[in-house]
Image (cartoon, rainbow, N blue to C red):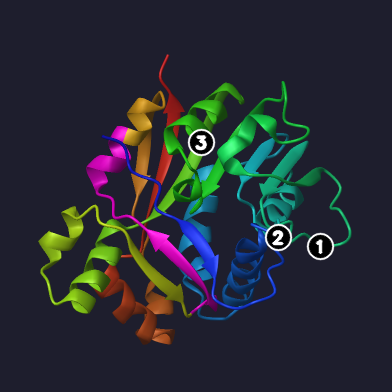
Amino acid sequence: MTAPDDSRATTSSPGSGGDESQPWLRLAQGYEQARSKEDSLDRLVEWPAQRDLLGDVGGLSVLDVGCGNGAKLAELVRDGATASVGVDISGNFPAGPTPGMELVRGDLSDLESVPGLADRRFDRILFLQTIGYADDPVRTLRVARTMLAPDGFVLLTRTHPIRWAVERAEQNGTTLGEEYYSTAPYTYYHRGWDDRVALTKHGYTLADLLNLFSAAGFRVEAAVEPQLSEDARRRYPHKQAWMNKHLGILIFKLLPVA
C-alpha cells in the first residue's frame, strides 16, 4: 500500500474568491516568513542536509516541484545550476526572474501538463516536503521519473511520521502506536505559517514511504535523518527539545530502477 494523499487545504476566512490556490498562497507566504526566522529548522537542519546530498550542481539542470517562492532554486542557480525550473501552485514568485531559472505556476498533481516541461529532462528533481500534496503521489513520481536525465536523481523529503503520531496521541489521549498506524484523516491549523488555513492530512508510516518509492519505480540510494549541529543545540535549546520529541524530517535520494 502506498502513502495516501495527506493534504487538503481550506481557508477559514472569507475573501478567497473561489480561487483554489488561495489557501496555498497563504501557506506559501507564511512558510517563507517562518523560514526567514533565525531559529527556523528549515534553515538550521533541513536545507543544509538537502544541500549536502545534492552535491555539486555546477552545470546541472534542476526541477524544484513545489518550490514556494523559488529561493532555494535561486541559491542552486547561484551555485552553478542552469536551465532550471521551479513549479508551485501558489504563484508566490518574486517580480524579477533570476537568470538561469524559470518559475512556473502549476499543480504537482498534474506535472505533465505544467507549461514548459514537455520533453524536458533534469539532472536533479526536488520534492522538498511537497510529495504529500499530490492527489496521487505514485503518479506524480512516475511522471517525474520520465523527466530525469541519465544519471539524474530525485531528492525527496518528508516530515518524520512520528511527529504526527506524537501530536495526535496527545490530542486524542491515545497511544503512540495507535496513532502511528492510524489512517484516519485529521485536520489542524498551522499556527507557525497561517492559522487561517486548515490542513486535512492522513497519517503514513515509514513502510508507506518505501512502498510509494517502489511503486513509482525508484530505489533508495541514501536516507538521512538530519540533526541540529552542536552549536545550534546550544543556541536554540527550544528547537533541540522539539527535535527530541518529534524527530524532524527524513531525506531520501532516489534513483530510478533500471
Q: CA distance from mark 1 to mark 2?
A: 7 Å
Residue type at mark 2?
Asn
Kindly check if marks 1 and 3 are in contact, taking CB atoms under 8 A apart as contact: no
Q: Are marks 1 and 2 in contact (CB under 8 Å)?
A: yes
Indicate the position of residue 138 as horizontal and vertical percent values: 43, 32
The residue at which mark 2 appears reads as 69
Q: Which of the 4 quarters of the picture holds residue 32?
A: bottom right
Earlier sequence position, callout 1 versus callout 3: 1
Q: Residue at x 29, y 55 (%)?
A: 203
Kind of element beneath mark 1: loop
- Residue shown at 50%/44% (left/top)? 134
Q: According to the image, label 1 marks what residue?
A: 94
Residue positioned most to the right: 96
Q: Give percent across and percent down for residue 73.
A: 68, 51
Q: Residue furthest top?
A: 258
**Disc 1 marks which amino acid?**
Pro
Q: CA distance from mark 1 to mark 3?
A: 25 Å
Judging from the image, what secondary structure is the residue with disc 3 in?
Answer: strand
Tell me the quarter of the image containing the C terminus: top left
Residue 120, quarter of picture: top right
Q: Quadrant of residue 182?
A: bottom left
* Depicted 144 relative to depicted 33: above or below: above
For marks 2 and 3 on the same chain, the one whose residue lies earlier in the sequence: 2
* Magenta stretch bounds: 192-211
* Residue bearing the label numbered 3: 154
Horizontal arrangement in the rendering, residue 239 relative to residue 38 (left or right): left
Quarter of the image for the N terminus: give it. top left
First in residue order: circle 1 vs circle 2: 2
The amino acid type found where label 3 is placed reads: Val
